[in-house]
Image (cartoon, helix red, strand yellow):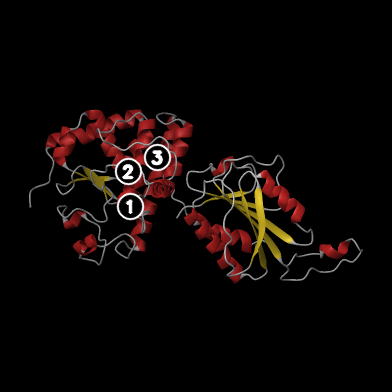
Amino acid sequence: MSDPNPSPNLEQRFSAALLRIRSRSPFFATLALFARFRPSREVVTAATDGRDVYYNPAFMSRLPEREFEGVLLHEVLHAAHLHVTRRSLRNPQLWNIAADIVVNGILRDHGFELPQGALFDSALERYSVEEVYALLLKHSQKYELPGLDLLEAAPADVGEDERESYGQPGNPRRSRARGLGDDSMSEARKNRLEAHWARANQQAATLARGLHKGDAPAGLERLLAAASPPRLDWRAVLWRFLTATPTDFEGFDRRYIGRGLYLDALQGHKLRLYLAVDTSGSVDDAQVRAFLAEVQGILRAYPQLECWLYYADAAVYGPYVLGPGDPIPTPRGGGGTDFRPFFQAVREAHEDYLGGVCVYLTDGYGDFPAEPPELPVLWAITPGGLDLEHLPFGEGVRLVG
């Protein structure tokens, strides 16, 4: 095995690069201090296993200063944003492309340079990696990726005393043939990585805010958001939203109040779910199927729920009353997007004595009603859709994962 150790000159270049980065961006410089930089000739350019950064000495030696800094930070951001552990069972190459687009967009926004051939997509880089991955799956963009830089394990030419075990103790090579979706990376190690980089991001943000230097506030918030992977699957949010709504109407039964009768409401009373699916072209068939399958699972688990399905573009079609196991009607629509017809239909159809909630599956781009509806609303926003904080009312969840 050849000696992967870098020359003293290359080690000096790393030190100098970190000093230059510190003068420009305390946030990035602090993150870089939480990474360990290891030479490896198994790596073609540079890569990370989520904790350490591995680089090919010959490749790094050829880079000019500005690109040297960019490559160094590219791998640090992959690690700090947990791109290795967040992949799960997704396609490794497509996930790596998505992660590169997000990281490279951040670096370019902050004035850093990358070697020729680096992936950029200004239309996608503002989204989370999960969203970019979903959009790439949907639209089948073609990108050239020289090689994967998100490693499942440390390179073989890194000394065993410098590696962290991925599989069974004392057998690091065993895990190299395994994927991140199985038990090759233990939950304990994932937790350690998450804690390590959470501490790094917190310290970096504290320093950057204290110095008021390097990152504009908006840019800093974007960095922190990118470093925080989605913690709650949209399915869990949907279940919580529907099942947390009271169905026993604690208090008086409103059907009898007008007659002067103040009777306790009956437990297990029907809750009507008004479900709108955007058919303007922004939601693909696979997303609709996955979403409606989850709704039907909830209906089977909670028979007091009654689902009224609407298809909606600039008009509204329905309602189709669904019960557990009922076939899904053929979607209708294809025009522009206007949310108002759906909420108007709900206003006209809803009966006061019933409990009710609204769920809208959409990209979020359309005309909202001037006044929010009286019923609770959950927006299920597709990948690449409206930022959740821009929703004028209701609760939002991103449909990724």
Point out which mark residue 142 bears.
2
Mark 2 or 1: the one toward you = 2
Q: Residue 398: x, y in percent?
A: 51, 50
Amino acid beneath label 1? Val
Tell me which corner region of the image, top left, top right, bottom left or bottom right, holds residue 245. Answer: bottom right
Callout 2 secondary element: loop
Q: Residue 297, relative to residue 211: is it above or below?
A: below
Please indicate whether residue 109 sits to the left or right of residue 307 in the image: left
Q: Earlier in the sequence, mark 3 or mark 1?
A: 1
Q: Residues within 10 Å of mark 2 (few under 14, many from 20)?
A: few
Tell me which corner region of the image, top left, top right, bottom left or bottom right, holds residue 97. Answer: top left
Kindly tell me whether residue 33 is visible in this rendering.
no
Residue bearing the label numbered 1? 84
Please indicate whether residue 233 sits to the left or right of residue 347 in the image: left
Please indicate whether residue 215 sits to the left or right of residue 262 in the image: left
Mark 3 or 1: the one toward you = 1
Q: Residues within 10 Å of mark 1 (few under 14, many from 20)?
A: many
Q: Residue 5, relative to residue 92: is it above or below?
A: above
